[in-house]
Structures are given as structure tokens and as C-alpha cells.
Amino acid sequence: MDIHELQLFIHLAGTLHFAKTSREMNISPSALSRSIRRLEDECGKVLFLRDNRTVTITEEGKAFEKFAKQVIDSHRNLMNQFRKSEEELSGLIRIYASVTASYTILADILKKFRQKYPRVRIELQTGSASGAIEQVQNGKVDITIAAKPNIFPDSLAFLPLIETPLYFIAPRHPGSVYETVSKQPINWEGTPFILPDKGVSRHMMNAWFHHMHITPEIYASVSGNEAIIAMVALGFGVGIVPKLVIDKSPMKEDIITITSAPKMQPYTVGICTSKRLLASPAVQSFREVSRTLYAV
């Protein structure tokens, strides 16, 4: 089986969308379809069910996805071990992080890592912090900077780096939301919320709403802490974001922290990777550099 075709299969298993996979993997839709058919012919099984509208992975496809990820990981580890015998470590590390994590935590790590291992290539993808762990689980990246959820997947390894508290925030400038949170006690059920669409802080807020018997007025569910700060600054509602993000936000002068709000459990932010990749010399070295810079 061809390594590239296995990579195409894994990507398609994550997107379940031929057009998206062909675009992101730089391959024509017809060539992608031929690659998938070759894999199905080799397996003697149907790996995807597709019609004009939807693509669904079969049970055989799910089993093959697990196999394909193991092969890709083993191939990458083998190539890295071969390169390790050379004078300098080389290879590729695919990293996913939020914009804030990229220019705070990750920037320091990459600076030292590049000085020590200049021949290791880095591919960096940025996106919402709430989707970080899924990127590693789906095999799209090797490493992500993420907040550790209460329920952490057994297949992943987590290296804690820092802790950052979570703050309730409101718009600084007068308006209906500012007036609402200025009155004590705060009427939380009458306060519009800007919440993350998923992730650790969304789970925390849902648990808090349940504990306080609050039926929240959710103005918007958005992707990314930066988007929450922007909408709060514009007066659409209140939100909850990590202090790390507030400190680095260009809009921090347009928001205030709600000092009378309840204290939430702080985030533990760290490096998340698949346990299968812990044998990779490049991943090992990246984790070691990170450990020397940060410690919880």
C-alpha cells in the first residue's frame, strides 16, 4: 500500500468530504476517487459509502483507518530514527494551536527548538482552541497546544506547561450589558452570554449553569476565545476566557473583568500528542524543549 494513499484515506475519514480532501491535499477529485478505489480493491472491502450528497465511513473503513494511522506513525517514526543517525535531528512536526497560543507559549518553544534542531521542519496550523484535541485524535497533526479537559482520551499523552485562570468579562463602555452586570447581585438569567461553541470552557459553563439552576440567555456560540473578546467588547454580552488570552488581546482595553463573578477552575494548558508518537525522536525533542521552558 502506498503511504500517500493512506494519508489521503485518513484525511477523507476525517472530513467525509471528497471535495474538501482533494482541495486540502492538493489532488484532483478524480485522482482521489481512484486512490480510494485502489485501497478498497486491495482490502476487498467497501471503506466508504457515498452518494451524490453524503460520504459515510463503514465499519471496515473505521478498522482500516486505525490500521492506516498505525502505518503512517510507524513510517514517520522509522524515517525519524534513520535521520537521527545523522549529525542532526531532522524530520517533520505538524502542530496545531490557537492564534493566542501561537504567539505566546508556542513562540518561545519554537524559537529554542529551531535553534537546537534547525533541520526539523515545522508545519503550523492555527484555529479555534476548542478543536485542538480533535486535530490530534483525527491524525491531522502530531502536536497541539491545548487545555486539558476533565475527561482526557486514553490514546493521548499530555505534558502540562502552564495554568491560567478563567475570567468572566463584560464590555467596558456603557450599554445594556454594562448596566446589567453593574447591578448587584447580577441577574445572570437576564444577562446575554457569548459562549464557545465547544471545548473545556463550554463544558465548565454548562456545568455552572446546571449547578446554579440558570437557564442562560445565549446570544451567540462562537469559535475561538478571540472572537468571544471581540463580541463582548462590542457590547453583545458577557463571556468567559482565559487570562492568557485577555493579556495578549488587542481589545483588552475595551473589556473589564467581572470581579463579583464566581471563580472558575483554572485551565491547565499543555502539549497534547498521540501516545503512538512518543517514540518519535522529533516529538520527543519537542516535548523536552517545552519541558525546559515551562513547568506546572
Image: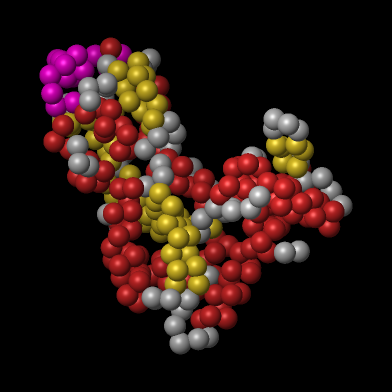
**Residue 102, how many percent across, how many down?**
33, 53
**Residue 33, how many percent across, how many down?**
74, 48
Residue located at (59% from left, 53% from top) = 25
- Is 36 in front, or is 237? 36
Residue located at (14% from left, 27% from top) = 172
- Name, please, the residue furthest toward the right: 44
- Is 32 in front, or is 88? 32
Image quarter of the C terminus? bottom left
Relative to 82, does residue 120 appear above or below in the rendering?
A: above
Q: Is residue 184 magenta?
A: yes
From which residue to which does the magenta span run?
170-189
Q: Is residue 91 visible?
A: yes
Q: Is residue 138 shown left or right of residue 130?
A: right
Image quarter of the N terminus? bottom right
**Residue 85, how many percent across, how many down?**
53, 85
Q: Is residue 19 shown left or right of residue 97?
A: right
Residue located at (52% from left, 66% from top) = 278
**How does the figure colour the protein chain or chains?**
secondary structure
Relative to 268, does residue 225 appear above or below in the rendering?
A: above
- Is 260 in front, or is 113? 113
Residue located at (69% from left, 32% from top) = 54
Q: Is residue 12 magenta?
A: no
Total marks placed: 0
Q: Is residue 294 visible?
A: no
Q: Is residue 273 shown left or right of residue 104?
A: right
**Residue 231, how many percent across, how many down?**
28, 28
